[in-house]
Image (cartoon, rainbow, N blue to C red):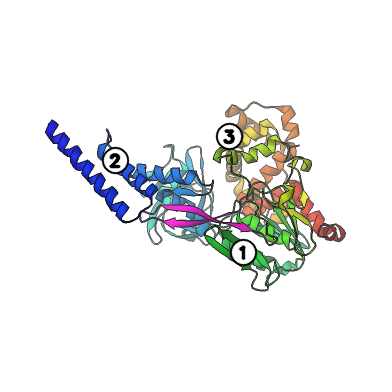
Amino acid sequence: MKVRNGFRKLILGMMIAIIAVNLQAQSVDKNLQKLQLTYQLINSLYVDTVNDTRLTEEAIAGMLKSLDPHSVYITADEVAAMNEPLDGSFDGIGIQFNILHDTLMVVTPLIGGPSEKVGIAAGDRIVSIDGDNVAGIGIKNSDVYKYLRGKKGTKVKLAINRKGQDLSFTVVRDKIPIHSVEASYMADPKTAYVKITRFALTTHQEFIDALDKLEENKYENLIIDLRGNGGGYLKAAIDIADELIGSDNLIVYTQGLNSERREHTARKKGRFEKGKLVLLMDEGSASASEIVAGAVQDWDRGIVVGRRSFGKGLVQRPFDFPDGSMIRLTIAKYYTPSGRCIQKDYSEGEDAYRYEIGNRYLHGEMENVDSIHFDESLKYHTKVSGRTVYGGGGIMPDVFVPMDTTMYSDYYRDLVASGTVNRMILTYVDNNRELLKGAYTSYKEFSDQFEVSEELINQLISAGEKEGIERNDDELKVSDLLMRTQLKALIARDLFSTSEYFETINTLSEDYNKAIELVSTKKDYAQLLK
């Protein structure tokens, strides 16, 4: 046995030596030799069984972690989940659902989608899927996705309970759109409002479609809401900016150590190159959102309102592996038309980078503009008016609006965080859907006439108590208006659409109301762009 083990070690040693010689003969970088030899040693001599896939993935992730916070390794499963919202669609049956009291309930079928076509309606309870019971078994959202999503053209059989009546449906899966323009409506008689939640493959067309629907209102002003928009595809951002910026004007350029400067300019007559324009941004607005805002601000085309944006000015390029995984490697930085890079500092490591937004809260930046300080060496000037703007840490708004915490309370936060608010509203709408739809045939009627009653508030309080959330009258008074508006907005979403949700909830938004004020006041708007 000893002779056999000794012979095995000798052979392994010779193999490693041959690998090393071959690598040297091929003039391979010494660091690569080191990496390959380490991998071979572990696989050949390590005391326990090694998971090759895990070892490789952790090695790749470790290398990328030493670069910047946005260069990452993504597994095959993660790639599919990541791409879905950016691709703008998935294959499924087309319903919004919620799990209420351990029951899978249809909140609403997508208009024109496969479920609506066969007659599935809001309020239906899905009892079984392809013969498998899904009621009262503790089903989770992830389980529902596995059951209902599948390749286009495949069928799924649903057993449904509708107000005590058992029904059966066969739904043929189809392409289901994921919308990145979540709301569009007239904020006032002259002002259109469009909310973009991400920059996906379909975003530009969705934006054009939204403007087309509002065209009959002959709007003169436009508010684009980019709050919480973490970015997406560079091309989508460029296409949106092209609708706002004059032809031949630079929108953004990218450049890196191994990537030549590449400029992207406005190439066509855009849909809204004239008229008052306001962009809403906050600390959750990043990357592609900052490209659009940087171009608008640098060309003095419109006004940015809100709080300082996230500060991501790095460009990633995906590199796919045969197994479906990928590397997203930072290859360049992007620069706004004035020449500024708005990437925030990441020299103190990934943890400090991730917690930077939290530090803004601690340092008072969310409430006081005087708490924000920029490096004077990163001062730039806008292209038309010569206004001062800064690089090195996000887009600073032209009009700062502090975070409104006056209606916030721990009591209301607990009601929301526990899911009590959503569950209670789902139950309320489900029990009163026909009555509500009969009373309010349009959103305008609902907006003008519906009021959240004391009875509904008491139902929420009781639901919270069942979840262990003790009633707090003092904090109820603080959050009363917020609570009532949120409940009304959620009901509007279930009766109408997500657009009506935002139209309702935005009435409490200080930055939204500031935007309307600015476009309504010619002198103030013009003064800010001087």
Q: Nearer the viewer, residue 508 or 253?
A: 253
Q: Which is closer to the viewer, label 1 or label 2? A: 2
Label 1: which residue? 238
Q: For the stretch drawn in magenta, what is the main secondary structure? A: strand
Q: CA distance from mark 1 to mark 2?
A: 49 Å
Q: Earlier in the sequence, mark 3 or mark 2?
A: 2
Q: Is residue 311 magenta?
A: no
Label 2: which residue? 41
Query: Circles 3 and 2: CB distance less than 8 Å?
Result: no
* Range shown magenta: 312-338
Residue at image position (77%, 43%) is: 369
Q: Quadrant of the N terminus?
A: top left
Callout 3: SS: loop
Measured as percent of width and height from the top left, residue 15 is found at 23, 46
Q: Nearer the viewer, residue 119 or 519?
A: 519
Query: Position of 416 compared to 159: left or right?
Result: right
Return the mark for residue 264. Answer: none
Crowd around label 3: few <14 · some 14–19 · many ≥20 (10 Å): some
Callout 1: SS: helix
Q: Is residue 183 above or below residue 64?
A: below
Crowd around label 1: few <14 · some 14–19 · many ≥20 (10 Å): many
Q: Which three-letter amino acid code belongs to the residue tagged 1?
A: Ile
